[in-house]
């Protein structure tokens, strides 16, 4: 019998982690074995409602029939041949992404941090070819763009950067929504800047949306100073914020957009979408990926996009969003000393607390609700876009009960 046909006891799994895994994670005291829709089941068959989506990854939930069928069918046909050859699945996916975003070209990779590394090289190439060797970057304080060297250098969080020695130089930080600071930086460093990267909602910083007027000014200054504007949509893409992509809320077009997480609904995949006019910045041999966009992940990503658009799940998500925000703000009105703010867009929701949220996350997990805490005090709520109203109500009732059980 296969080692995977039956669940192992949790303690056995934990022991194997202790013996064989690097200790860079601190997993919660549960191991999931099965998922269906917005429901997860652990190795002891306990049921949970998923308000996390694997950190905004499984936007279609678990066990979606069309995704399972696409994986099965593609696995029987071909998984991988490399980017040395043409790939039908990749071609169709690239076409679909461009049709639903902006005119341009696509590069496929395996993760969000790789997508941001590719964007970094795109901007550096722009600086070398078009701006006399410009190599500096503008980023926002508290941003998160990944954990490899370039993406970590672009991440303005000391907890991510510390312990690894010197980072890349020429990275300038701006306080989010500080128009004067933004204008001053471009006035002083505009000729030396090759790129600016922003999250329109800072996820790891606590679900903090940027002011739209600030975003529009970023776009104007980047255009004026010939600086490539890269929008990091890794956590916000594919319907999470109530639009297919978050930049649509701001009414701007980026020069490049990075994608991952929900792109293939759980399979590891990233992408860099580059607007027309900049595609010559990364040409033959300048960048690549062995696995990026292989037959399997590209097929699943294509099906994921088809389902989100074809079933109009964004309209459903927006209706759910109204319900979530209304319920959460009613709870906030009852518990103002515990809940400081409810913010976000769509189903990308942050609940800022007056105290650390780790214990609340643990209590919710015990009662069958999966969410997490970021920035120490912000509960992050990101359910699947096709969450049922019944389970939305049940999950929020669990959260309300846990809130009310907290000591005053």
Image (tube, grey):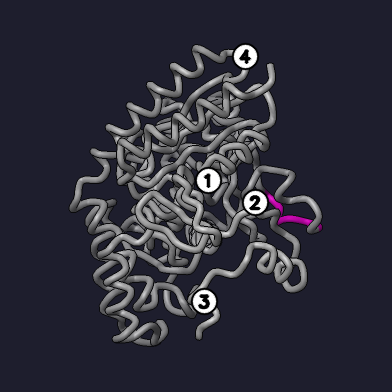
**Mark closer to the observer (2, 1):** 2
Where's residue 64, x and y in %? 31, 60
Q: Nearer the viewer, residue 207 or 65?
A: 65
Residue depicted at x 64% and y 38%: 173
Question: Helix, strand, or loop for circle 3?
Answer: loop
**Mark closer to the observer (3, 1):** 3
Mark 1 / mark 4, whichever is N-terminal: 1
Mark 2 / mark 1, whichever is N-terminal: 2
Q: Nearer the viewer, residue 59 or 105?
A: 59
Q: Is residue 272 visible?
A: no
Q: Which mark is residue 4?
A: 3
- Distance from disc 1 to disc 4, alpha carbons, whole Å, reads 38 Å
Does the magenta run of residues contain 166?
yes
- Rendered position, 296 above or below 80: above
Where's residue 347, x and y in %? 39, 37
Where's residue 397, x and y in %? 45, 29
- Distance from disc 3 to disc 4, alpha carbons, whole Å, reads 46 Å
Identify the magenta region: 165-170
Residue beneath disc 4: 337
For residue 354, side relative to residue 128 (left or right): right
Does the magenta run of residues contain 28?
no
Marks 3/4 in contact by CB < 8 Å: the verdict is no
């Amino acid at each position: 019998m296969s080692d995977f046909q039956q669940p192992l006891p949790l303690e056995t799994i934990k022991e194997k982690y202790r013996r064989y895994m690097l200790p860079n994670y601190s997993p919660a005291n549960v191991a999931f074995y099965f998922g269906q829709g917005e429901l997860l089941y652990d190795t002891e068959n306990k049921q949970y409602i998923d308000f996390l989506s694997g950190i905004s990854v499984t936007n279609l939930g678990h066990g979606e029939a069309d995704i399972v069928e696409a994986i099965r069918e593609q696995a029987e046909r071909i998984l991988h041949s490399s980017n040395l050859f043409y790939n039908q699945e990749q071609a169709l996916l690239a076409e679909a992404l461009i049709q639903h975003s902006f005119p341009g070209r696509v590069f496929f990779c395996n993760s969000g941090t790789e997508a941001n590394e590719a964007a970094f090289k795109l901007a550096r190439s722009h600086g070398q070819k078009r701006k006399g060797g410009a190599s500096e970057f503008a980023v926002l304080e508290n941003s998160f763009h990944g954990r490899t060297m370039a993406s970590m250098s672009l991440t303005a969080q000391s907890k991510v950067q510390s312990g690894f020695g010197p980072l890349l130089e020429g990275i300038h930080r701006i306080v989010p929504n500080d128009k004067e600071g933004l204008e001053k930086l471009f006035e002083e460093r505009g000729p030396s800047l090759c790129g600016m990267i922003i999250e329109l909602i800072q996820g790891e910083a606590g679900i903090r949306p940027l002011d739209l007027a600030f975003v529009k000014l970023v776009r104007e200054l980047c255009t004026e100073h010939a600086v490539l504007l890269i929008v990091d949509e890794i956590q916000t893409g594919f319907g999470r914020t109530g639009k297919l992509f978050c930049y649509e809320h701001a009414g701007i077009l980026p020069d490049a957009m990075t994608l991952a997480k929900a792109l293939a609904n759980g399979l590891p995949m990233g992408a860099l979408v580059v607007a027309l006019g900049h595609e010559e910045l990364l040409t033959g041999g300048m960048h690549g990926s062995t696995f990026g966009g292989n037959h399997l992940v590209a097929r699943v990503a294509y099906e994921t996009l088809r389902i989100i658009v074809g079933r109009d799940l964004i309209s459903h998500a927006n209706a759910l969003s109204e319900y979530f925000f209304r319920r959460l703000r009613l709870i906030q009105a009852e518990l103002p000393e515990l809940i400081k703010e409810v913010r976000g867009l769509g189903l990308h929701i942050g609940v800022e607390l007056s105290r650390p949220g780790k214990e609340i996350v643990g209590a919710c997990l015990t009662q069958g609700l999966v969410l997490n805490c970021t920035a120490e005090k912000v509960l992050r709520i990101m359910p699947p876009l096709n969450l049922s109203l019944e389970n939305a109500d049940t999950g929020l009732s669990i959260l309300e009960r846990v809130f009310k059980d907290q000591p005053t």
